[in-house]
């Protein structure tokens, strides 16, 4: 559980209740697909990394921040869980591979050098400062 904060009438942050944090990749996918109708995600846990094998935003909804919001939710989940996330940019869904590589790079994905992971890009979790 995490508290949700909003600004009150004086601009101060106030707690409004609680939001349940997703415990598994499956729970996160359900939540994101419910929040963004038409969004298609395949995101699964694995031994070395959670793998994002598909993210597709409906054509008419692209370029409005949906894909970035989904990526932030996925990377926040991975940071919280201390998980690597792996993916392979592909032109199979109509996108340009170069543009996709740049897109994922904005969320901390780098060229994968870990031979135990077959995907081409990998993001390590960000450690919390002590
Ligand atoms: C890539 C995708 C998920 C991004 O979702 P989105 O909601 O459009 O993204 P946002 O509005 O948050 O951000 C826009 C960024 O998405 C990326 N993007 C958008 N359309 C894209 C496309 N056709 N090809 C590659 N990247 C694209 C770009 O980085 C863009 O930023 P830019 O305009 O500065 O170049 C979405 O465009 C999509 O579904 N593309 C087709 C499916 C696909 O190729 N999926 C990835 C398979 S590996």
Image (cartoon, rainbow, N blue to C red):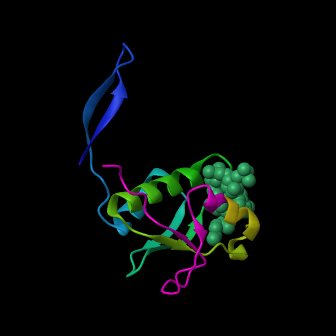
Q: Residue 49's spot in the image, x, y percent? A: 43, 75
Whether residue 34 is situated above or below residue 18 in the rendered picture: below
Q: Residue 65's spot in the image, x, y percent? A: 61, 47
Q: Residue at x 31, y 37 (%)?
A: 4
Q: Is residue 75 left or right of residue 47?
A: right
Q: Residue at x 75, y 67 (%)?
A: 98
Q: Is residue 37 left or right of residue 58?
A: left
> Foreground residue, 18 or 100?
100
> Foreground residue, 72 or 125?
125
Where on the image, by quarter, is ligand 1?
bottom right
Please tell me whether the stretch drawn in magenta is mainly helix, strand or loop: loop
The image quarter containing residue 10 is: top left
The image quarter containing residue 79 is: bottom left
Q: Residue at x 74, y 62 (%)?
A: 99
Whether residue 14 is situated above or below residue 119 in the rendered picture: above
Q: Is residue 79 left or right of residue 18?
A: right
- In the image, the segment drawn in magenta is 103-130
Tell how many labels. Answer: 0
Q: Is residue 106 magenta?
A: yes
The image quarter containing residue 34 is: bottom left
Whether residue 78 is situated above or below residue 54 in the rendered picture: above
Q: Residue 24's spot in the image, x, y percent? A: 32, 66
Q: Residue at x 60, y 67 (%)?
A: 110
> Foreground residue, 21 or 104?
104
Q: Is residue 62 visible?
A: no
Whether residue 67 is situated above or below residue 83 in the rendered picture: above
Q: Is residue 56 magenta?
A: no
Residue farthest to the front, as pictured: 130
Q: Is residue 72 visible?
A: yes
């Amino acid at each position: 559980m995490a508290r949700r904060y909003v600004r009150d009438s004086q601009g101060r942050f106030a707690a409004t209740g609680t939001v349940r944090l997703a415990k598994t990749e499956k729970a996160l996918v359900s939540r994101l697909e419910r929040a963004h109708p038409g969004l298609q995600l395949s995101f699964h846990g694995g031994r070395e990394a959670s793998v994002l094998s598909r993210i597709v935003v409906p054509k008419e909804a692209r370029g409005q921040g949906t894909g970035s919001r989904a990526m932030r939710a996925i990377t926040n989940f991975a940071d919280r869980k201390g998980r690597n996330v792996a993916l392979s940019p592909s032109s199979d869904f109509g996108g340009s591979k170069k543009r996709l590589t740049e897109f994922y790079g904005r969320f901390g994905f780098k060229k994968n050098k870990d031979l135990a992971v077959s995907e081409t890009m990998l993001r390590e979790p960000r450690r919390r400062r002590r």
